[in-house]
Image (spheres, rainbow, N blue to C red):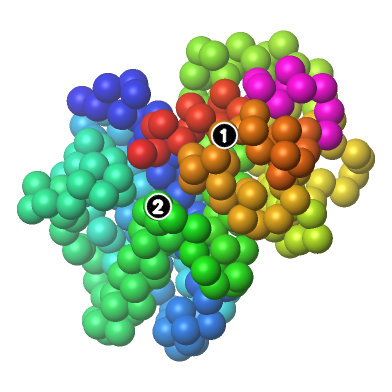
Amino acid sequence: MASQEALYTNKIFLCGALPLLKTIVADVPSLSKKFRAVHCIYQVSALDPDAPCGKYATHFQVNCDEWIVHANKVDPKPYIDLEFKSVDAMNAFFKGKISPATLPKMKGICKHPGEFVAFLTALLKMANLLGMTTIPEDEATKRLLVKCYFYLLSTGISTLNKMGHEKVHDWALKSPDRVYAWAVEGEPSVSAYLRVKAGKTKAGKGEYKRAMPFFTMKFDCLDSALGILMSIDDMLESTRQGKLIMEGAPEFGAQIGEYMMLVGGLAK
């Protein structure tokens, strides 16, 4: 039986991190090529006796360049299922604590090794990106990494609320209809948002265009964004230097920053 904190971490991986595969494959041409002839249902799962289906999972329906993500949903007969023996084993694996005890078993009905190799390559690319400790030099990699962090944080906060995390859910319950956004100046494709209303939350990719966000955490460039997202730079100093622009009341910046740190702490 997994602890509550382990379940919070697991759901952040299932709902926030694993869905990033779709974005990563779409943005990396060398990966996209590997899926050109793939028609497969991939799944990553963790066994747990308390789970409704005996396991928690996220699965993907892949048809060439079209990916449909089913976050936190079990497929009964995936072509490929990377099955971890427990929630704790899966959490440890995605935190980089790889050992014989944390490695998953490959199950399923796949008859084409190339489909497994393509999926494994994508997973390793995701692990490499999220495991970086210094800002990459390549602009395309910077852009993809910031995008992944934005998506992970917005989805992670929403996931914790839906799971009833006391602090996050209490905040969401008291909130009127508001949109919090993350953005980088001059990079409209690198953005994400979180809509909060009376206890409900919805994370989204890209710019929120129905109305002006209530609060936006905006960075002057990709390097400045990564400085904060990778815990390299100090948030107050970045704000003083104009690298981080808080479009909205500062107290809301501190509040959303606290929940960003909460998600980051669970995922590392």
Determine which of the numbered discs, if any, sits on residue 55 in the image: none
Residue 23, percent across and down?
Answer: 56, 64
Dominant secondary structure of the magenta stretch? helix
Q: Earlier in the sequence, mark 2 or mark 1?
A: 2
Three-letter amino acid code of the residue under disc 2: Thr
Which residue is disc 2 drawn over? 133
- How many numbered marks does the figure carry? 2
What amino acid type should be assigned to the residue bearing mark 1?
Asp
Residue 177 percent coordinates (x, y): 82, 25
Crowd band around label 1 with a 10 angstrom C-alpha radius: few (<14), some (14–19), many (20+): few
* Residue 40 covered by magenta stretch: no
Q: Where residue 114 appears, x then y in whole percent?
A: 30, 84
Marks 2 and 1 in Cβ contact (< 8 Å): no
**Which residue is more in the foreground, 58 or 266?**
266
Residue at (57%, 50%) from the top-left corner?
226
Question: Can residue 90 be seen by looking at this rendering?
Answer: no
Q: Secondary structure at mark 2?
A: loop
Residue sitting at the far right: 211
Query: What residue lies at 19% left-to-right and 63% top-to-bottom?
Result: 106
Q: Quadrant of residue 245?
A: top right
Which residue is at a point 81% across and 46% down the rendered structure image? 208
User: From this viewpoint, is residue 260 visible?
Assistant: yes
Magenta segment, which residues? 247-256
